[in-house]
Image: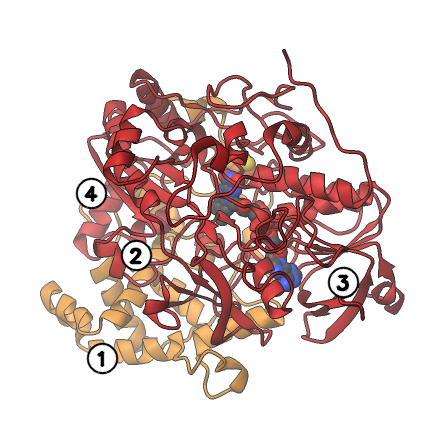
Amino acid sequence: MGYLQAHELRTLAAAADRLVPPTDDGHPGAAALGVVDYIDGLLDAFSTDPPRIWAGGPFSGRAGGDTGFVRFMDLSSLEELAWRTRIEGSQGIPERERMGPITGWQAQYHSGLSALGADFGDLDSDQQTARLDADPEFRDLLYEHVVEGCYAAPEYGGNRNLDGWRAIDFPGDVQPRGYTDAEVEGRA
Amino acid sequence: MSAAASNAEFDAVIIGSGPAGATAAEVLTGAGWSVLMLEKGRNHLMALDPPFAPLGHVSNDELKFMRRYFLGPDPWLEPRTFRRTEADGERIETGDVNNLPSTVGGGGFHADGKLPRFRDDDFKPLSAAGPVEGAAIVDWPVDYDEMEPYYAAAERAVGVAGEAGANPFASWRADPYPMPAGPDMYCALLTARAATEMGYHPYRAPTGVNSVEYDGRPACNNCGFCGYFGCPIDAKGDPVAPLRHALQTGNCEIRDECVVTDVLLDRSGRRARGVRYLDRNLEPHEVSGRHVVLAGGAFETPRLLLRNELGHPDVVGRFLQFHFQTYVLGMFGERLHGHRGRSVTHLMDDPIVPDAAAMDAAREAGLPFIRGGIVEHGAAGHPILEGIHLPQGALHSQLMMQSMTRDRMAVFTMQGEDLPQATNRIDLDPHVRDAYGLPAGRATYAPHAHEIACAEHWAPRLEAVMREAGAQNTFWTTSPPIGGSMADRPGGRTPISRHIMGGARMGDDPATSVFDRWQRLHGVENVICTDSSVFPTSTGYGPTLTIVALAIRASRALAGLDPLRSERPS
Ligand SMILES: Cc1cc2nc3c(=O)[nH]c(=O)nc-3n(C[C@H](O)[C@H](O)[C@H](O)COP(=O)(O)OP(=O)(O)OC[C@H]3O[C@@H](n4cnc5c(N)ncnc54)[C@H](O)[C@@H]3O)c2cc1C
Ligand code: SF4
């Protein structure tokens, strides 16, 4: 499992930490939250069957019930077409080019990470920011994925040990326990 | 699917399984009709065999529901396009344009289900308040007194929890709500108290969510993944309840992943004989039906009519209405834990009935009145949504920990009435096609000056309520944007509203409407439409309870059942 090469993973970790850096008072950086695994898992989602696109349900087990989230769900053939196109790109395949050619996330990460440079991890933060700003399109794609990896359910590979949710005081999924009426109506 | 099943003639073929289609299915199967329901999306709602239990696909998972199109439509598979006016050229956006889920259950599946009734005046806006230049305001071909028993039936079918008499602007009702109102969210208690102190009239929102066990489904346990999420425990009634009731009769077959491409007419051209659809392998099928019910929603139904050249060509697709949404955001010092409980627990109708200050503002804007919409008292979204909108870098992590735009934020959403305009319309995009090979629906939409004046009048007043409630900072914005920075942000230009109305309005005159007062297609007697395409005006209320009430009325009429009646308490 894993799509990116070791040197790309190192650049990715440094870039993710630049976009979501650790704080002194308890927010771990993106890399410590497992964002690299999250993104590498997304790029490689179709290496497993079912693919790692939609976690199952109804419960994760964290608030009672069964551990359904770990059973990823099947995609229909059209859904698979859409997600493969998004991740792998259209690659000249006619049914993937209905809306025009599409550069997939895999290729965007290869070229985006390589443009950040093999020395990216050694730069100071201003230099790293400048390199990221040189390609706002890739930076914004990366940022969205980094944020997802920090705060999505841990079954997707990020939010390690629930530290993303803990840092922001968010309890995450709560079914089947839910909240009592008093917890809804009362002060925090 | 067996060959016999696929070739049988059904009493009715229903296109779409959202609240509009599910309600029709419940009424028609209850009348003994055999019904085939065709739904283009997948089934994640419930098993289609007895006892029709939940499938366990729904979860408290922000990534799956908010970022990865779990309930569809995937905007790449089913793109829609958007432009503000013809001056924008063919389109300025392609992808997600007011998308409601494409799935068994439609938008009802993930709506959080505030289900207020319209008021008496809302059915006669022209007689009650008169015309507005540049808008095609008309009275509805049905009035509140006739609708009352259908509203009551809708509230029972879906299961609505609420507090009769709590809203001073409401019209009369014959019966109490089927369930007491559910628990109030903390932030809405703060904002509702402040609003009351300032002379407004907030009330506990009537909601299609069980506050107690009802109809074999459990009470809501306040999980907080409500609006935009399905309910993992089936505490939301619409459209789970009507669909399950329909299936329980044994007269209803649901085929998911079947997209209807055509309504087939007989040789006379005045009767439908069935529909053509593509199955999940994109294989075409024809199926016979003695009646056809259009329930694809107010965007897809006009698109289907246009593709089939059905309905008056000068009217179909026109008078598309959204709610003009004004958001007032308040940031509090304390944590409000808006992630607990339903998404909204209070409403207020004050902007719907203009007071003296609103009439002054209207005069200043050269308008006879300004009519807003319900103000929803609710909370902000979930963490991924918050994170994506924060600045990148060091500030991100600090702001996420403070959570000014999630855990410390309360939100008012005003669902402003959107006046009907002939130029606001759905048509077929000349170039963009969906994965089924069909032309994409294109929305051309720009608000009327009324909507803008109304937002500008109410936003500062609602900010004052937020501050009274304890907010340290407030700001407001609208969707679609009024000028300003949002206007040029891609994706920010389409109206976010998921309340879609008009597009095939009903009325008595076939020259100015598409459906008649019983929602029958003018000129094709055995086709009805039960979704909000038929709404002549948008009002300031969420459309769904009225969709359901009208669907009960139209379906009963179609099946030859007696009209419902109720007594107005004296
Ligand atoms: C987050 C959210 C919250 C909401 N909250 C509220 C609220 O509080 N109050 C309120 O009143 N409303 C609310 N709404 C709006 C509500 O969801 C809609 O008004 C309602 O779903 C409309 O019902 P419908 O049956 O007309 O259409 P839909 O729910 O859109 O259902 C139409 C169905 O038909 C299918 N379909 C369309 N065309 C075809 C075809 N050609 N072949 C086969 N199938 C087809 C679609 O896939 C879809 O499943 C909310 C919406 C959202 C997104
Ligand atoms: S808040 Fe209640 S109704 Fe909404 S999804 Fe959770 S349990 Fe269901």
Residue hosting label 2: A32
Q: Is residue B491 found left or right of B184 in the rendered image?
A: left
Label 4, secondary structure: give it: loop
Chain A: give its colour.
orange
Provide residue B45's location: percent of width, then percent of height: 65, 50
Residue hosting label 1: A115
Chain B: give its colour.
red
Dot 2: chain letter = A
Residue hosting label 3: B270
Q: Counting residues from the N terminus, which is met first, the one under dot 1 or under dot 2?
A: 2
Q: Which mark is residue A25?
A: 4
Q: Counting residues from the N terminus, which is met first, the one under dot 2 or under dot 4?
A: 4
Look at the image and tell me in which quarter the C terminus of chain A lies.
top left
Q: Residue at 69% x, 47% y: name it.
A: B22
- How is the structure coloured here? by chain
Task: Say which amino acid is labelled 4.
Answer: Asp
Please identify, in this view, whether the residue under mark 4 or under mark 3 is nearer the observer. 3
Cβ atoms under marks 4 and 3 closer than 8 Å: no
Task: Say which amino acid is labelled 3.
Answer: Arg
Provide residue B88's location: percent of width, then percent of height: 33, 68
Cβ atoms under marks 1 and 2 closer than 8 Å: no
Q: Is residue B167 above or below residue A136?
A: above
Furthest residue in direction right, as rendered? B4
Dot 1: chain letter = A
Furthest residue in direction bottom, as rendered? A92
